[in-house]
Image: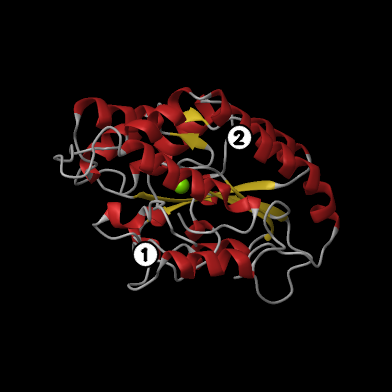
Amino acid sequence: MMARSTGSLGFVGLALLLAGCASQVVGPGQPDPVNNNLYATLYLRTAAEYDALGRTIFGAAGLHIDALLSDSNHSAAIEQRGQFSELPPGVIVDVDETVLDNSAYQATLVAENISYTTPHWDGWVAEAKADAVPGAVAFAISAASRGVTMLYLTNRRCIQRDADGDPCPQRAETIENLVRVGFPEPDPGNVYLRSAEFDFDSDKGSRRRAFAERYRIIMLFGDDLGDFVSGLKEAGVTPADRDAVVARHAERWGREWFVLPNPSYGSWLGVLGDELYDQLEPWQTGDTK
Ligand SMILES: [Mg+2]
């Protein structure tokens, strides 16, 4: 396992640990099931520790919000430009596995041993049945009471289902889901999906920039490094590159940038390639590393 120098990286370590635990279920040389997300999904579905983590992260954010709000020279967004001190304050949050918990969907994939597909996921989005991530609703209500606007930035994809219908029914469905679990109802103009408006670009930098033209961004929340920094989805990005990005922004974590645990999927997994067992680097007798 890669060396980790700070406690704030523990979630990635946890993800790798869980991947390792999963190897007890499907070992080397055994056929992989279609979906080997069992331990990660059980953690998200059942662990009291996951509940405690959400409360810890959003609770800690609540301790910092007043100081960041009162410092008009502060912005948490790298993309924030120009004179922003007079702009109204906002917080950018990712949606999936940041404020909405889709582990019930993940559980379906594991239980039925099927792969994620865009149409299958879109059916889940339409039902608007995701739970809230623990701690997120209380934070959102507290932010609203301070005049801070929640800005939702998700890679949920706009897909027109009927030829003459809404080109992005997923926006209204996401808002419906947020309201159902207790979030203050967002203005649809503050819910950015992956859409034609932004060339369906999965990199969130252009949408952070668009929010930063209207708001002073005081905090960012996400479960993926791409929720904070652009350019991490390019070919050739390595786990070490991602560690370096985290270290470069050491002062921001836990103050203005808050990361939620997602051991189930994410760009951390995408950079590992196809030979996942090669990434385990197991301990061997005589290994002095
Ligand atoms: Mg997410």
Find residue 169 and report its horizontal and vertical position in percent.
Answer: 34, 41
> Circle 1: is it few (<14), some (14-19), or many (20+) Cα within 10 Å?
some
Residue at 45 percent across and 71 percent down: it is 231
Residue kind at label 1, given as amino acid type: Asp
Q: Which mark is residue 236?
A: none
Say if 189 sits above or below 46 in the image: below
Camera-nearest residue between 29 and 201: 29
Residue 85 lies, with reference to residue 129, above or below; the image says below
The reply to whether callout 2 and callout 1 are in contact (CB within 8 Å) is no
Picture coordinates of residue 54, whole percent (x, y):
60, 34
Q: Earlier in the sequence, mark 2 or mark 1?
A: 2
- Which quadrant does the N terminus fall into? bottom left
Residue 127: give x, y in percent of width and height.
34, 28
State the residue in front, 106 or 169.
106
Residue 151 visible, this angle: yes
Query: Relative to residue 234, is residue 67 drawn left or right?
Result: right
Q: Which residue is mark 1?
A: 201
Q: Residue at x 37, y 32 (%)?
A: 39
User: Marks 2 and 1, how far apart in space?
Assistant: 28 Å
Left or right, 197 with respect to 60, comes to left
Indicate the quadrant where residue 43 lies: top left
Q: What residue sits 54% from the left and 32% below the top? A: 133
Q: Which residue is mark 2?
A: 54
* Element type at mark 1: loop
Kindly report which numbered mark, 2 or 1, lies closer to the viewer in this rendering: 2
- Residue 251 x %, y %: 72, 63
In this rendering, the answer to whether 198 lies above or below 44 is below
Please identify the quarter of the rendering in which residue 51 is found: top right
As rendered, which of 248 and 279 lies closer to the eye? 279
Q: Farthest front residue?
A: 286
